[in-house]
Amino acid sequence: MMIAFLRWLVRLLYRFRMHNTEVLKTPGPVLLIPNHVSWLDWLFVGLCLDEDWKFVVSSTSAETSWLHRKIMINRRTFPIDILSPYAVKHMAEFLQKKGRLVLFAEGRLSRTGTLMKLFDGTGFLLHKTNAKVITAYLRGAPRLPFSPNRDEKRWFPTVSIHFKEALTPPHIDNVSTAEARDRLTAWLRSKMLLHQFETEMKFGASTIPEAIVQTALLRPKHVVVEDITTRVNYRQLILGGALMGRQFARVLNGSAGTPRPTRVGVLLPNAVGLPVTLLGLWAIGKVPCLLNYSSGAATMLACAQLAGMKQIITSRNFIARAKLDVEPLTSAGLELLYLEDIRKRIGAGAKLAGALRARLGLGSLLRCPHTGEDTAVILFTSGSEGVPKGVELTHRNLLSNMRQMLAVIDLQDWDRLFNAMPMFHSFGLTVGTLVPLVRGFFVFLYPSPLHFRLIPNILYLTDCTVMLGTNTFLAGYGRRAHPMDFRAVRYLIAAAEKLQDHTIQIWTRQFGVRPLEGYGATECSPAISVNTPLGFKAGTAGRLLPGVEYRLEPVEGVAEGGRLHVRGPNVMRGYLNKDANEKFKALGGWYDTGDIAKVDSEGFVTILGRLKRFAKISGEMVSLTAVEEALAGAFPQYGRRLEIAVISRADSDKGEALVAVSNEPRLTLQDVRGAIQSRGLPNLAVPRELKHIKELPKLGTGKVNHRELEKLIQ
């Protein structure tokens, strides 16, 4: 009677639902491992279980008060002294007798609302008992007032519990007990993260606008986006997207019988107007194609023609300030639509009606006709190694990648992200903009990552806790910043290029911030792996994200590692380019990164270099990236502005030869040779020539444009 009453009560208060409870019939020995986010977790879990299940509880904590004793010491609990070395032994003995235990393996309530570290005693239990494991994910419980994390709370959030099929832990032989314990603990944590990710994908929003609106309903007054001149809360963001969407429908849709293309170009900087524009286009079923304005008019025109777009949404003010040459675009027949003109068409009546509706029915203000499998955006690769490719990323691709990252990084309501990475780059779009909008925390959008003196001061003034950058940009900020500028930063995520040792030293020693390196590709939405505080290994690009599979194909001349292929729900729908798309489809869902990498037993990825950035010298493969890394930061006597890159050219004697290129005229070939030898690289890695140019060509992400550099040096 009491169980029935409690089930009715939690369904009434929290709309509580249980999923896949059949797995709870699994006979012992079995461990049920839920995430632990609120004081009511035991109630939600207990209402699903038969009476022979027992909760592991701390006998010490049970003595805190009479209420604790009543709840924690009874026939449904298994009290242990957590300070006793025999506690795990007692649990193991119970399991070996076919017992069934519920264990909150984190050992404490999560202070972040996300999965924290698991105590290694859990791995020891699995190693000694061979018990099966059922993971449970409590969805929605972090919003309960009874949850100690700092996120905004609701009295009656929707809560559900999701059980995963029983898992058999891997058998680990021929290693010490300590190593087996650590491996099994890591295995369990990876399974719990994967379960969380899969549950969010199954039961969460299927499109980006839907996900943003759901978060907006939780925090409508929360200021979520700000730029240099404008700041908006969720209600204003959704209203702006809805109003702009109606205007876009009028100017983008053709008359009857002459429909306009679905793909629409977007040529805008990092500012509030860009996410508003994206929401407006999604609301009318259009696909934004974000153009790289740093690539030049010829490349933008090639991308526009590849996508078949006829119209581009831009801004007069932006074109004037950035001094963009758009004449080739208009001459080719592309129509430029200016946000300034479109905004003027929104009448006072429409604004008033929209504002009223935003107050009374925010959830119905902005609808998206897309499904999760529809293309959400088209991004264009940098083209550093050939003609840019058009990458189709679906709503499911982007949401998958966001949820993969949110599963392993404890981003919270109170975080504040600074994003100067342009949104035509997937790093700036997904990580820097969409993650904050979907998760529900503040983002400051800045139009250029090149303002090395201004950006540290803006970080100081905005109290941002999360920062993104590439090695090039981070090194530039570090050279000019005051030690107090990054006092609030708790997450510094670096990607898009290899993070150099001298950049790491600047940030750790001067600012006390540990950069967390990640790895990805536009085609993967973009993140593939990332280092986190709970999963960090220096010198790597982090651990593979939940749901990402990999394989390494052998490469002739490369003894260690192989050509990295990845597969997962974050991998793109395909390319616009016919030849490239046929090659991608032939791989059956696998994406060929083109990178040579190695992956260790824990899933940490080390990038050795791009296959196209290897030179074959005297029959041996030499990584140009490794040579550049050896030279980076090796010449402090010439100042911090020194840049150096390495390319290869044909050589009649040895097949290929290396050429170093630098912007420092005082640098000598002898300096270069000495730096290579001091790092222990073989003589084959020593460049045969040194060229000097005024400035190395760059991509929009700050990386050296090796393709253009080769043209300059020829």
Image: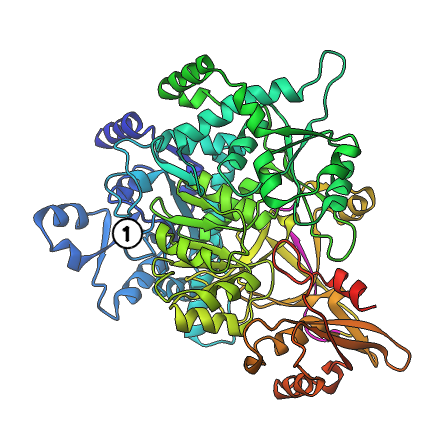
Q: Which residue appears at 51% of the width and 56% of the height?
A: 451
Q: For residue 580, say whether it is visible.
A: yes
Instruction: Classify residue 565 by image quadrant.
Output: bottom right
Magenta stretch: includes residue 416? no
- Quadrant including the C terminus: bottom right
Determine which quarter of the picture holds residue 610. Answer: bottom right
On whether residue 564 falls in the magenta region, the answer is: yes
Task: Give the magenta-colored segment's residue range.
Answer: 558-571
Circle 1: element type: loop
Residue 58 lies, in percent from the top left, at 21, 57
Q: Residue most toward the right?
A: 652
Residue 50 location in percent, x, y? 32, 40
- Judged left or right of residue 677, residue 90 is left
| Residue 374 showing in the rendered view | no
Tell me the crowding category of disc 1: few under 14, some 14 to 19, or many 20 or more residues within 10 angstroms, Cα based.
many
Residue closer to the observer: 261 or 120: 261
Looking at the image, residue 282 sits to the left or right of residue 97; the answer is: right
Image quadrant where residue 5 sits = top left
Q: In this view, does 542 lie to the left or right of 189?
A: right
Rendered view: 326 above or below 241: below
Under mark 1, the amino acid is: Leu
> Looking at the figure, which quarter contains the N terminus?
top left
Of 299 and 625, the residue lying toward us: 299
Q: Which residue lies furthest to the left in this view?
A: 66
The residue wearing badge 1 is 109
Q: Which of 602 and 584 is in front in this view?
A: 584
| As drawn, 124 above or below 142 | below
